[in-house]
Amino acid sequence: MMSMSVPEPAGLFGRMIGPKRRWRAYKARIRRLPERYRLVVDALERYLMHFGPVDGDHAMAVFDDVAELFERAAAEATPIRDLVGDDPVEFVEALVRNYGRGGYVDREQDRLVRAVDRAQRAEGPERPAWSGTVPVGDTALYVRDSGGFGPPVVYLNGAYADLSHWRRVIAHLGDDCRHITYDARARGRSQRSADHSFEAGLGDLSAVLDARDVEQALLVGWSYGAILSWHWADRHPTRAAGLVCVDAFPIGLTGDEGRARIRALFHRMRWALPIASRFGMAARMTAEEHADVNIEINRDQRGVGPGDRAAGLPRAVRAGHGRQPRHARRGDGPRQGRARSADRGPAEPDRRAGRQQPHGDPAQGRRGHRRLGPRRPGPHGPVRPAAT
Amino acid sequence: MPKLMTELLKGALEGIVLAVLSTGPAHGYQITARLRAEGFPDIAEGTVYALLVRIEQRGLVDVARVPSEKGPPRKVFTLNDQGRAHLAEFWEAWTSLSHRLDQLRGGT
C-alpha cells in the first residue's frame, strides 16, 4: 500500500477529521509543485472528482498517488508528455482502476454481478420446495427446504430451539439462497429419541443433507448449532461451503461444581420446560436430559474454537457475542484471501446474516433485539449460565 | 497505428513490467527507461507508475524506500516469488495467444 504522509487518527474521531486533514496535506504537497505540473494535477483532480472514486478513502488513495508521482517527476524534471503520455485519460483511468471507485459504484457493480449470478442459476434445475420428516435411527426429523435456484444454506438451531427462530433471517435473505431448516431430536416438530448426544446431532445433519440430496452447503449455526457446524465441517471439509457461527464460543462450565450447577438450574426449571417447549424454547426432554445435553457440550467444547477447526474451509465467517475470544472475531490469516475470492454467491448472505445478529436470538433481527431482547428468555435460556 | 499499438499493449503491460523486474530490482523511472530502450518509446511514466501501484497492491513485488539525492525517497521494486509465478503465467498465456494468432493469420 501507499504510505501516507500524514498518520490517520484512529476511531470515530479519525473518521470524521482524518479525510479532511489528509486532503489538506495533499493540497499542500500540490502547492509546492512547479506550475506546469500543478496545472496538470489540477486538471487530474477535476477529472477524478467527476469520474474517480466516490468514497473518501478510495479517493484519497488516488490523490496521494498523484501527489507522489508528480513530486517525483518534479524532482527529475520529467517532461510532462513523458509523464502522462499521449493520452492523459488513459493514464488517469489506469490509476483509478487500481482502487475501484468505492461507495455506490461498487454497490451497483456488485448488484450487477449478483443479478447475472442469479440469472445463471435460473438456467439450472429448480428445486421444488419441500417439507416433511426424515427418519434417522429411532427418530424422525422435521425438515423444511425452500427449494429454488440458490446455493444451499442449512441452519442449525440453538440447543433447545426449533427452526422457527430462523424465520426472519430467511425472509431477509430471500430467494438468493436455498434455505434448509430442521428441528433436532425432541425439539420442535421432530420426534423423540433415546439418544440426545452431540454425536447423534452430527449424524442428523448428514442425514438431512443426504435426504435433500445436498452435497455441499453453507452452515449457519447459532450457539449449540454453531458448535455442531464447526465439528461437522471438520469431519466433512468438502461438504461445508463455509460457516457462519452466531453466539458460540468455546468456554466450558466443567468439573463437578459446574455439572452440579447445570443440573440444579434445569431442575429448578423442570416445571417450565414442557411449556417452553411449545414455543420452541425447550426440548421435549426431561430436566435431566436437558442437563445432559448441556453438560456434554460444555465438556467437549472447552478450549475448542472454530479458529482451528475451520482452517481448511473456503469460507468461514464468525459473528456473535462480544465476549468471543479475539481470534474468533474475524477470518484470520491465510483464509482471508480465499474468503474474498469466493466472495460472491453464498458469501453475501453469510455476511449479511452475520451482521444482522450481533447478539442472542437470530430470529429477532436488529429492531427485534432491542424490543424483545432483555425480557424474552433465550430459547436456550437455561444454557446461558454455562455460556454456550 | 500508434493508437492501435497502445491498445494492444494495454493488456500486456503488466507482464512486460514484471519481465523487466525479473532482471533485477528497479525504481519506477528505471523501469520506464528500460522499456523505452527496449522498443516501447511511447510508454508514459505515469502509466507505469499506476501499474506498479497495482502490482504492489497484489503482492507481486517487495518494496523498499530508498533515499534519493533529489526529491522524495524512491520506491525500489523487487519481484518476489508470487510475482515470478505470475510472470510465468503471463508468458504461458502470451505464448498460447500468439500461437493462436499465428494460426489465424496462416489460415486465412
Image (tube, coloured by chain):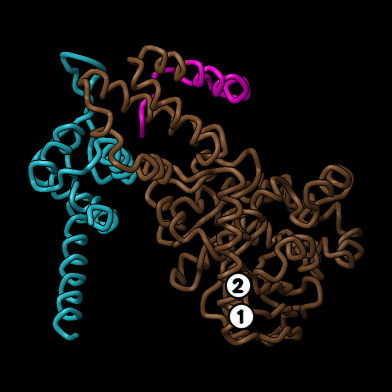
Name the residue carrying label 1.
A122
Residue A187, located in which quarter of the rendered image?
bottom right
Is residue A15 shown in magenta? yes
For the point 55% across and 53% down, which residue is it?
A317
Range of magenta residues = A1-24
Nearer to us in this view, B7 or A269: B7
For the point 30% across and 35% down, which residue is it?
A84
Residue A368: give x, y in percent of width and height. Answer: 84, 49
Check whether the beta carbons of the residues at disc 1 and disc 2 lie within 8 A of each other. Answer: yes
**Which amino acid type is marked by label 2?**
Arg
Decide if residue A68 is on the left or right side of residue A317: left
Output the letter for the chain in brown.
A
Residue A219: give x, y in percent of width and height. Answer: 59, 65
- Density class for disc 2 (Cα within 10 Å; few <14, some 14-19, many ≥20) is some
Nearer to us in this view, A327 or A109: A109
Q: Chain of mark 1?
A: A
Decide if residue A325 is on the left or right side of residue A189: left
Residue A82 numbered tag: none
Is residue B60 shown in magenta? no
**Which amino acid type is marked by label 1?**
Ala
Name the residue carrying label 2.
A118
Tell me, yes or no, whether dots 1 and 2 are on the same chain.
yes
